[in-house]
Amino acid sequence: MANTRRRVTLCIHSGRRQNSVRVTCNAVVPGAVLPLEMASTQTRDAAAQEPVASRLRPEALRGDDGASAVEFALVVPLLLVIVFGIIDFGVVFGQSLSLNNAARDAARYSVVRQIDGSPSRSCYDTLARTRAASVGIGLVPDRVGVTVSVNGTTVCSISAGTALPSSANTPALQRAPCAGSVSGTTDQLRVAATYATGLAVPIVGVSTFNLTGNGYFRCEYS
């Protein structure tokens, strides 16, 4: 049987150039596979003829590009406040522990007799011991104020920022804190260390505040 299939002429509009239309015509057999160039041209022309409104669908307009940047900008300030707050709290808490340890060490140092029988430790020694033990992050020993008292009565003291004399040059500094105490009484020695501290990482509305460390021991000698 003779092949009676007829050829069909297919014309494709391939684009406009300077107000002119380029038309390409090719003879093809119905049902045959179109050449790649002709097929792609048809697809491109069909997409070009599709209305713009149908191509801008709602799901295409609701993209999440930039959402991560917005979320990051909202979270970062709160995160920084939390991190810097933890740092400040750690530094201040460490300074408070150092002051309490220094005061307690100096108080214990002052209430016991020396084993070798040498003279009792003076109030000057207690002040020097407190400052020497005041070591911590951001803690400056020379800015530590120290007060030594027995039963609420001040024996000697030194203000914060005042340099300690090179020797016990006053009667108050030469006196032993527990002098005159009788064994078995409730005479109690107190060493108080104070320090004005600031925040390692400044926070708006917070400046400096005072820390206090205390050491209490009962006098053990007369």
Image (cartoon, rainbow, N blue to C red):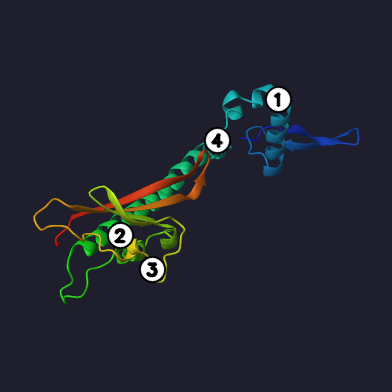
In this rendering, the answer to whether 174 lies above or below 9 is below
Mark 4 → mark 3, Cα distance in angstroms = 71 Å
Number of the front mark, 1 or 3: 3
Q: Residues within 10 Å of mark 1 (few under 14, many from 20)?
A: few
Which residue corresponds to mark 3? 169
Q: Is mark 3 on a helix, strand or loop?
A: loop
In the image, taking residue 196 as reference, residue 175 lies left or right, namely: left
Counting the numbered discs, the total is 4
Return the residue nearer the eye: 15 or 58: 58
Q: For the C terminus, give its image quadrant.
A: bottom left
Which marked residue is nearer to the observer: mark 4 or mark 3? Answer: 3
The answer for how far apart the CA atoms under marks 3 and 2 are is: 23 Å
In the image, is residue 69 above or below residue 87? above
> In this image, 61 relative to 196: left or right?
right
Q: How far apart are marks 4 and 1 (CA)?
A: 26 Å
Distance between the alpha carbons at the discs numbered 1 and 3:
96 Å
Real-space Cα separation, disc 1 to disc 2, in angstroms: 79 Å
Determine which residue is flagged by label 4: 67
| Residue type pointed to by label 4 | Ala
Residue indicated by mark 1: 52
- Residue 136, percent from left and from top: 38, 60
| Secondary structure state at the residue bearing disc 2 | helix
Please tell me how crowded label 4 is: few (under 14), some (14-19), or many (20+) other residues with Cα within 10 Å: few
